[in-house]
Amino acid sequence: MSQNGNEDTENDESVSSELRCQYRQLMFETKEKRTEYVRPESTGLISTLEKVNKLFVKVKNPREAAFDSGVLKLASELGSEQASNLQTNITVFDPAIFCEKLVTFMGGRCNENEQRELDWAKLGRVAVPIFNKTPKLDFIYGPLAMEPIIKNRAARERTVQKKPSEAEKKKPHQLKQEEQEESTTKEVQRVFKAIYKLTDPECGPYVHVPFFEFITDPSSFSATIENMFHLSFLVKDGKVRLYVDDDGVPVVKINTVGPGVVTNTPSTTRKINPSQVIINITMNKWRDLIEQFSITTAMIPRKTGDAGSSRDT
């Protein structure tokens, strides 16, 4: 079986080789006879295509198919060139020849010493049957006595754009920032008034207010944070003092001496450098402060819009 298989393979290879050789020979002959094949009366391309069709029946491999397509491409090029060489013998209109015949028809031919006028009436009599009706004469703009219509265009008034004022030039985020600063200033003043009422020498219940009891709002954790935030502005500006009393409890008091000055005795004063303290209050610490100091009401009055807010959890 193996010997038969090898013999079949060798036979197929020999057939393919011979087929490629025939394609090469056919392509060579077609190129050699190119001048003859492109003549209009030549039938060489037809015989070439017939040979290609016979060879294509034996094609089994891509290599032979490539040779077949190459011969067909060459034949199509020659066929296009042969078609361009064909003469259709169609009569072409020549204006010069037509004019010469027209002059002869109207009797215009004459010798060098004799000249004749063209008989246009003769041409008109021949052309009359062609035109059944003469087109009438008309004017584009109607009767000649009609005057053209003049359109009156209304004069347009130029609108002068007004320059925007300084208030209009302000951007939205600038206005928003100014509103926030104004709101913060009002809240700081509200906290300052609360300290003043609590430490008023005439009617205030405290000489100095305990810090945690002052800022803690038992009904709102967020309000407690805001109170501490607004109080920090008063301490920074030196309007309020934040210090530790003899019992070690942080207290606040209105500073009547001035920013950066501490009095130990009525007759002595000393300068101090401002310092910063970071205080961290979480939700659990807030609840512990309420329970430890038994806070039931807030010392700092709530804002008008937050009077009916619910308790933070």
Image (cartoon, grey):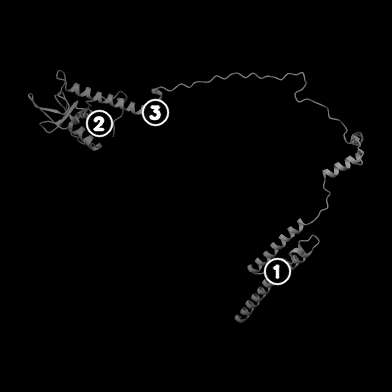
Circle 1 crowding by C-alpha within 10 Å: few under 14, some 14–19, many from 20: few
Residue 294 visible in the picture: no
Q: Residues within 10 Å of mark 3 (few under 14, many from 20)?
A: few
Mark closer to the observer (1, 3): 1
Q: Which residue is mark 1?
A: 28
Please tell me which residue is depicted at 61% across the width and 81% down the height of the picture: 3
| Number of numbered discs overlaid on the protein picture | 3
Please say if 230 is above or below 156. Answer: below
Q: Which residue is mark 2?
A: 229
| Placement of the C terminus among the 4 image quadrants | top left
Residue found at the far front of this picture: 113
Residue 47 image-quadrant placement: bottom right
CA distance for labels 1 and 2: 101 Å
Q: Earlier in the sequence, mark 1 or mark 3?
A: 1
How far separated are the C-alphas under marks 3 and 2? 26 Å
Image spot of residue 308 (x, y percent): 31, 25
First of labels 1, 2 by sequence position: 1
**Amino acid on which disc 1 is placed:** Phe
Asked where in the image residue 240 lies, by quadrant, the reply is top left
Q: Check disc 3 and give the amino acid type.
A: Pro
Q: Are marks 1 and 3 in contact (CB under 8 Å)?
A: no
Asked if the residues shown at circle 3 and circle 2 are in contact, with their CB atoms under 8 angstroms apart, the answer is no
Residue type highlighted by circle 2 = Phe
- Say left or right for 259 vs 268: right
Position of 60 with respect to 38 (left or right) is: left
Q: Callout 2: few (<14), some (14-19), or many (20+) C-alpha neighbours within 10 Å?
A: some
Q: Secondary structure at mark 1?
A: helix
Q: Residue 18, image x and y in percent?
A: 68, 74
Q: Which is closer to the viewer, label 1 or label 2? A: 1
Name the residue carrying label 3: 172
- Kindly report which numbered mark, 3 or 2, lies closer to the viewer in this rendering: 3
Separation (CA) of disc 1 from disc 3? 86 Å
